[in-house]
Image: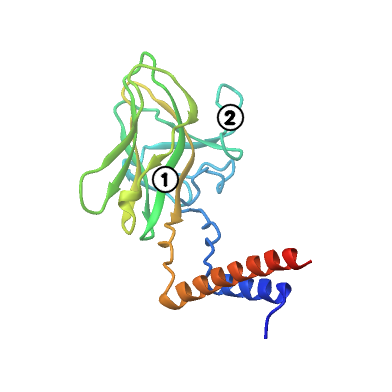
Amino acid sequence: MHLGVPARVAALLLAFSAGATFPAAANAQTNLVTNGSFEADGATITVPPTGWSRAPSSNCGFINRTGGGGYPAATEGTYIANVAFGQTNISCQFYQDVAIPASSNVTLGFAVGALLSGRTGTLSVSVVPTVGAPLVVYTAPANTDVTLAEVTPIDISAYSGQTVRLQIDANSGNYFNGYLDNFRINAVAAPPPAPVPTLSEWAMILFGLSLAGGAALYIQRQKFTA
């Protein structure tokens, strides 16, 4: 018994659907930093801010600001963190420990600015792994004012599967004003390897191709006999 063209086409589609594979939906991006835009505390002065820790000095100044009055506008949300010191030569760290999922593609991003022209203060951002040397990803240029702006995202996928410390180091020098906003560590699960068809899937694909050839031949013969 011969199948008509519609039946052959249906068989072909069935064969390919049995053996075909389709790319998975794009994996969701997850921000692993808590309160990276410093919105959680609103206008309340909270030292350290929610989600962050502070060391070693209790004199570390940390104030939420909105734009205006000489302060830059936030790059994300309403508030920025203004790191300021009323004393000279105060060293301070603000940090947050972040667990990075294994098998992830990971980037670090943030916005930073500083008033350092004519001053000796310093400001840097580092990724500190549990084992190994810290990775300094940003150092404010000495004796230079830096407008608050986003840095180019930094690939830190090498720390996938580890807990790292996102660390901000500041020293007041003779005076200091630093601006921070929108800290984020974005992790996206690495895509699984492309599936390879099994022997049975290859057989179905070849069977589908033979059906396609048969359908084409059938149509050609129908044209000649018409």
Q: Colour scheme of this structure image?
A: rainbow
**Percent coordinates x, y for residue 13 in the rendering:** 63, 71
**Percent coordinates x, y for residue 171 in the rendering:** 32, 30
In the image, 124 versus 188, the foreground residue is 188
For disc 1, the marked residue is 107
- Residue found at the very far front of the displayed protein: 225
**Real-space Cα separation, disc 1 to disc 2, in angstroms:** 24 Å
Residue at x 21% of width, y 44% of height: 133
- Residue found at the very far top of the displayed protein: 118
Q: For this view, does 214 lie left or right of residue 135?
A: right
Above/below status of 102 relative to 208 = above
Q: For this view, does 68 lie left or right of residue 34?
A: right
Above/below status of 179 relative to 30 = above
In the image, 2 versus 40, the foreground residue is 2
Q: Could you classify mark 1 by the number of other residues whose Cα lies within 10 Å: few (under 14), some (14-19), or many (20 or more)?
A: some
In the image, 42 versus 8, the foreground residue is 8
**Percent coordinates x, y for residue 76 in the rendering:** 57, 38
Question: What's the mark number on residue 73?
Answer: 2
Foreground tag (1 vs 2): 1
